[in-house]
Amino acid sequence: MSFEKSAIVKALTNVADPNTGQDIITMNMVRDLEVDGNNINFSLELPSLDSKNKQELNFACMAAVQEVYPEANVNVHTIAKAPGVSQQPQSPLSHIKNIIAVGSGKGGVGKSTIAVNLALGLQQLGAKVGLVDADLYGPSIPTMLGLQGQRPQVKQVYNQSKIIPLEYNKMPVMSIGFVVEPEQAVVLRGPRLAGIIKQFFNDTIWPELDYLVVDLPPGTGDIQLTLVQTVPVTGAVMVTTPQEVAVADAVKAMNMFLLPNVNVPILGVVENMSWFTPAELPDNKYYLFGQGGGKRLAKASKSMLLGQVPIVQGIRESGDEGKPAVEAELPMATDALKEMAKNTARQVAIRNETIDPTQIVKMNN
Ligand SMILES: Nc1ncnc2c1ncn2[C@@H]1O[C@H](COP(=O)(O)OP(=O)(O)O)[C@@H](O)[C@H]1O
Ligand SMILES: [Mg+2]
């Protein structure tokens, strides 16, 4: 019998990292998974080699894998986490481990809300996270993080001007909204748009990051194309409401990522505005936008439903006030957003163990 990498990765999600309590896949600790005949080999990255939990973790990994493949020889090799050593030295952003694009078919489905809360939810899991607002036509991240009106600094590095991102709660953030007035953004056209997106990645000083979350404009267009030609996008998270028309548009947007020469895997689907529950009737759910859209989109992309986020007045208010919902304590909403972030981290880790790194798209024009 041959062993499936995805089944092994799934089994390892049952092993908890004693330091954080999160599973070792979500925490990105498993490296170089290999199946060689009857042997299953992988490395386990620990903060230091004399970690007192080393042996215990080794045993836990073996037991978890043998739960699905009792006949396998499981070889766990522990390695010390080397700070600053990059995974993909050939990329210009090799110090950024994962770039997650957040896309949708339509506007107004809550893509920016999801992007902000996903980024902060990943940060809550202990990851180093940055956020790019690539919706150059309608930047809303400055408002959602209470950073409107602030300007990033520009620093001269070897005679080149580099931008230093603004920060929200230690999370570096870039947005066109920090550079131009909102009324100016709408008149930007093709080549200028591409130039700005490139600046966000190549002329911005990003610190070392586990995840860089990119909030895209809706649909498919110049910005999406420039993104995949500028950086290797690890995977895309698609946001939809349960409504049929939102799903139909999201399928089109999703198909762009799946084009053979683009080849960006879909990490999963977030269904937003899934239902409404009035505070005074906490047991009632009203499906204002219908039901099942997220599940259908996940099925169409052969991915998973990363979360269902209900309509909660506090989510809208927290966005307007610059205090993201994942950091608040909103009944029904905060837990759903945290769960979504955790599922996304897990899907990124599974993707990285089972599929080759994404390549920057080369266009011959
Ligand atoms: N689950 C939700 N509950 C309540 N309001 C929401 C929810 N998701 C988004 N909103 C609100 O809906 C509006 C549109 O969301 P936004 O994230 O800007 O959408 P998009 O980026 O897709 O255009 C915002 O005012 C936002 O605060
Ligand atoms: Mg938006």
Image (cartoon, helix red, strand yellow):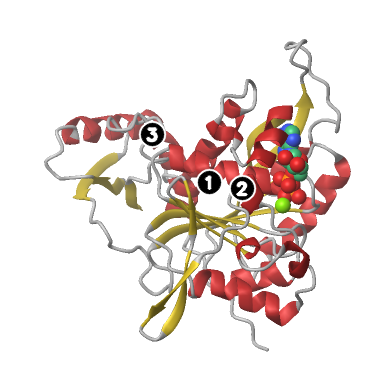
278 on left or right of 179? right
- Whether 154 is drawn above or below 47: the answer is below
Q: Nearer the viewer, residue 243 or 217?
A: 217
Circle 1 SS class:
helix
Q: Nearer the viewer, residue 96 or 193?
A: 193
Residue at mark 3? 23
Q: Position of residue 329 (x, y in %)?
A: 57, 24
Q: Position of residue 121 (x, y in %)?
A: 51, 39
Cβ at disc 2 under 8 Å from ligand 1:
yes
User: Which quadrant does the N terminus fall into?
Assistant: top left
Residue at mark 2? 115
Residue at mark 1? 119
Measure how far apart labels 2 and 1 are at the Cα level: 6 Å
Rendered image quadrant of residue 62 = top left
Q: Which residue is depicted at the point 17% across and 33% down? A: 55
User: Which quadrant does the C terminus fall into?
Assistant: bottom right
Q: Which residue is depicted at the point 65% across and 35% down? A: 318
Q: Earlier in the sequence, mark 1 or mark 3?
A: 3
Residues at discs 2 and 1 in contact (Cβ within 8 Å): yes
Q: Which residue is depicted at the point 46% across and 80% down? A: 161
